[in-house]
Amino acid sequence: MFVENIMTREVLHVGPEASFSQVSEIMRLKKVRHVPVIDQDRKVLGIISHRDVQRAQPSMITTLDVGEVKYLLSKIAAADIMHKSVVSCSPRTQIEEAARMMRPKKLGCLTVVDDAGRLVGIVTSVDLLDFFLDITGCWVEGATRITVKLQDRAGQLAALLASVNAQGGYIVSVVSPRTPQSEGLRTATIRFEAKDAGAVVQGLREAGYELSVDQTA
């Protein structure tokens, strides 16, 4: 799946001349934490985060009066506080790759640009979290979640899924990264639906699978 499937297309943005108060109000009223700064051709010039806005505000212990604070803030433009080194991706970037781009630098978002560098969307860490919850079946009510230990060799996962189906279970999601939990073993986490989830679990145990029932909704 690609970034274009989960990104926000209607992106709130500002120009480099936008005032500090404009940026702050957009974030407060629209409840967003990142605002791209673009030029007239929609080319990305920078990005402003909620943290940048907080840093630009005077400290609570400042000796300045309200009028002085407002005057100083009125002199600050988006171009003054934006990050110019913006990490972007294309709409056809794989979601996993977008996450790999964000994680090392602890980025809260990526701007999404077309081949000409024009802003077409934004993907945030919240979008990635929602994607994770979706592919792991967390939104499916009434599903049973089991964790099964498997031998780390070809055919083991396929046999397990076939056994779940044979016992009357309908697979909702499967997560089984090839990162052995111990030598020669790997873990598969499966969510399934069934009229009698207990019977499915019992049947799997009788078939020789070592498993635990982590959650039944």
Image (cartoon, grey):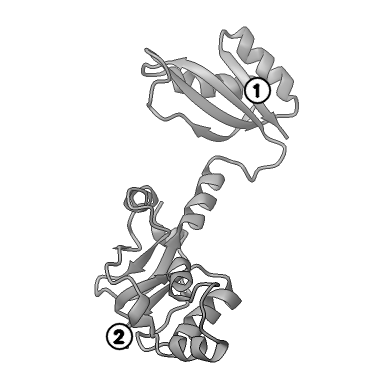
The answer to whether residue 1 is above or below residue 157 is: below
Q: Residue at x 47, y 77 (%)?
A: 12
Q: Which residue is mark 1?
A: 213
In the image, taking residue 95 as reference, residue 142 lies left or right, namely right
**Foreground residue, 196 or 179?**
179
User: From this viewpoint, which residue is outermost toward the front?
Assistant: 63
Compared with 130, 67 (above or below) is: below
Residue 198 percent location from the top left of the image? 73, 20
Which residue is drawn at the image coordinates 46% and 74% (left, top)?
11
Q: Height in image: 153 above or below 86? A: above
List x then y, in percent, for residue 89.
31, 62
Question: Is residue 94 placed above or below 158 in the rendered structure?
Answer: below
The residue where tag 2 is placed is 41
Query: Which numbered marker is on residue 127?
Result: none
Left or right of 17? Residue 160 is: right
Q: Amino acid at mark 2?
A: Asp
User: Which of the pair 107/167 is nearer the observer?
Assistant: 107
Amino acid beneath label 1:
Val
Say which label, 1 or 2, has the lower sequence index.
2
Crowd around label 2: few <14 · some 14–19 · many ≥20 (10 Å): few
